[in-house]
Amino acid sequence: MSTSATELMKTPLNAAHRALNAKMVDFGGWDMPVQYPAGILAEHEAVRTKAGLFDVSHMGEIRVKGPGALALVEHLTPNAVSKLALGQVHYTAFLYENGTFVDDLLVYREGEEEFLLVVNAGNSDKDFAWVQQQAKGFDCTVVNESPATGQIALQGPLAVGILQPLTKTPLDPIGYYFFTHGEVAGIKCLISRTGYTGEDGFELYCAAGDTERLWNAVLAAGKPAGLIPAGLGCRNTLRLECKMALYGHEIDDTIHALEAGLGWIVKLDKGDFIGREALLAAKAAPAPRKLVGFKTLEKRDIARDHMPVVQDGRQIGFVTSAAPSPTCGFNLGLAYVPTDLAKIGGRIQIEIRGRAVDAEIIPTPFYKRAK
């Protein structure tokens, strides 16, 4: 039995989405827009060529502050937190002792002893409980700021030109994966430059009560440039083209960080962290499986998330994410396959509605923007 809309959690922009006639869906317990009337293809194209505006207020924000904050976040995550400059962000993960994923997240260094951890919406409560549990013995406070925080993401090549007239904060000096604080449309914001689409853009964090005013101001400012609201549907196709991991698909509690192709966030020489011993052992042994990109060879064959990869009638792997690619113009996906089959140009078969269809392993990311 499906959860009714009245039981779903709502972001501060729920009424705004409905006023824009968005198609709303249950996304991890949240009532979220999957698309607006323009449709997923138009929204995807807008982000790649002009700009799109996303509601990401459902994401979780956890603040860790105090003399032991750095030590705690280093213990919790495999990336080298001590190397973050003030105002810098990096991508990392919470891992279990066996090296698999509690979640992936962004770490914002707000101060020498203060960090903002931005986690996935569907894992927010689990993650907060995990951080609290691990924080015992560390001299710091852990606060769940998610309910008090709104967040919107402006993504696309025209993002700087749209946003700059709304703020006195110079945007060009904010580097990729850096942030600052300033006012946007008269609203106090954390202004960050990361993104989950492969395009340039900014995330604006503000007080929950200011989110709708901020959303409306950015939409109005960008309308002459072609900015449109964008939903979860195109967010998924955009991140898939760029091979950005999604929890529950490329990563989860059965997949460890190295086989997920995320060895670059694992700094085994930084000192101890949760999952380090398991990842050291995994690095020393041959990897049994690998995450690869593929395209189906026939245009009519569209793979979907979690379909089996098969060989001689038996399952040997699985698709993590797949969809027709608006930018590339063919049907693509990501899949875990045995390492000996994971060669560029190699062939695999995917079971689609009872048929084993041919697919070719191709390089990833499928799309990378020109600098």
Image (tube, grey):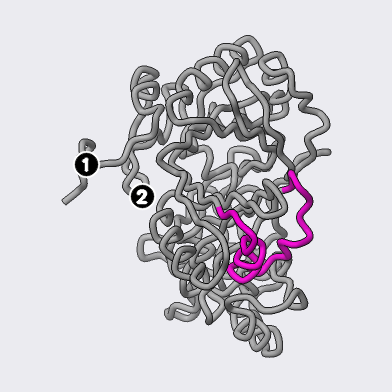
Residue 256 quadrant? bottom right
Residue denoted by label 2: 28
Mark 2 packing: few (<14 Cα in 10 Å), some, or many (20+)? some
In which quadrant of the rendered view does residue 5 lie? top left
Query: Looking at numbered disc 2 in the image, what kind of residue is underneath it?
Result: Gly
Q: Position of residue 242 (x, y in %)?
A: 66, 49
**Which mark, residue 7?**
1
* Relative image position of residue 60 (x, y in whole percent): 47, 48
Using the image as rendered, state which of residue 34 and residue 98 is in the foreground. Answer: 98
Q: Tell me residue 293's x, y (percent).
A: 63, 61
* Coordinates of residue 173 in the picture (x, y in percent): 83, 32
Q: Which label's residue is closer to the chain start, 2 or 1?
A: 1
Q: Is residue 326 above or below residue 77?
A: above
Q: Quadrant of residue 75?
A: bottom right
As measured in the structure, the alpha-carbon distance from the residue carrying label 2 to the one carrying label 1 is 12 Å
In which quadrant will I find the C terminus?
A: top right
Q: Is residue 367 above or below residue 303?
A: above
Mark 1 lies on a secondary structure that is loop
Query: Is residue 261 in sight in this rendering?
Result: no
Residue at position x 49%, y 71% in the image: 136
Which residues are the magenta region? 64-88
Query: Which mark, by number, is residue 365?
Result: none
Q: Nearer the viewer, residue 308 or 278?
A: 278
Going 55% across and 15% down the picture, which residue do you hit? 217
